[in-house]
Image (cartoon, rainbow, N blue to C red):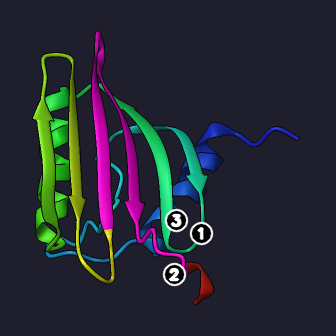
Amino acid sequence: MKVPQASLSAIALLILTASSTANASGAGLGALYPGARLVKQDQKSDCKARYVIETPSSYTKVGDFYLQQGREAGLTLLADTNNPDFRMIAFGEKPPKRMLFVIVDREQTGAKATVLYGQPDSSCDQR
């Protein structure tokens, strides 16, 4: 049985929203870029997830969105490489070891981003 893309996107958004930690803007750590199309989503556990999005927005705007998200969540910026064709942003923290890792690729029609967020700690899966 094939599930319609709209249903998959709605389900993934619910999962991502429920498993993310609210930040000052209310968007939540790991929230989807506004208006982006969800291409792929892997739910690893209640503590972390990975997804891929596409958007007509520039890769700079997408990167800035996730940069703000990590800062508002109080994470430490570990890397922000801004190359002509891609941007890699990495945030982390000491316990509880939350993290946000984003690679944004420049596309002819906008940007494509892979986002990994959560708490990659084995104790998290035991809650």
Asked if marks 2 and 1 touch (Cβ < 8 Å), the reply is yes
Outermost residue toward the bottom in this view? 127
Asked which secondary structure carries label 3, the reply is helix
The residue shown at (12%, 42%) is 80
Outermost residue toward the right in this view? 1
Give the mark nearer the N terminus: 3 vs 1: 3
Residue 36 shown in magenta: no
Q: Which residue is mark 1?
A: 45
Residue 27: % across, % down: 26, 66
Give the mark nearer the N terminus: 2 vs 3: 3
First to last magenta residue range: 99-124
Asked which secondary structure carries label 1, the reply is loop
Q: Residues within 10 Å of mark 1 (few under 14, many from 20)?
A: few
Against 111, residue 117 (above or below) is: below
- Asked if residue 57 lies left or right of residue 36, the reply is left
Residue 29 falls in which quadrant of the image? bottom left
Asked if marks 3 and 1 touch (Cβ < 8 Å), the reply is no
Amino acid type, residue under disc 3 in the picture: Leu
Residue 126: % across, % down: 61, 86
**Which is nearer the eye, 23 or 101?**
101
Find the distance from the CA under tag 3 to the CA under tag 1: 14 Å
Against 99, residue 10 (above or below) is: above
Residue 92: % across, % down: 24, 65
Q: Which residue is mark 3?
A: 14
Q: Which residue is mark 2?
A: 124
Amino acid type, residue under disc 2 in the picture: Cys
Residue 103 shown in magenta: yes
The residue shown at (13%, 23%) is 83
Against 71, residue 106 (above or below) is: above
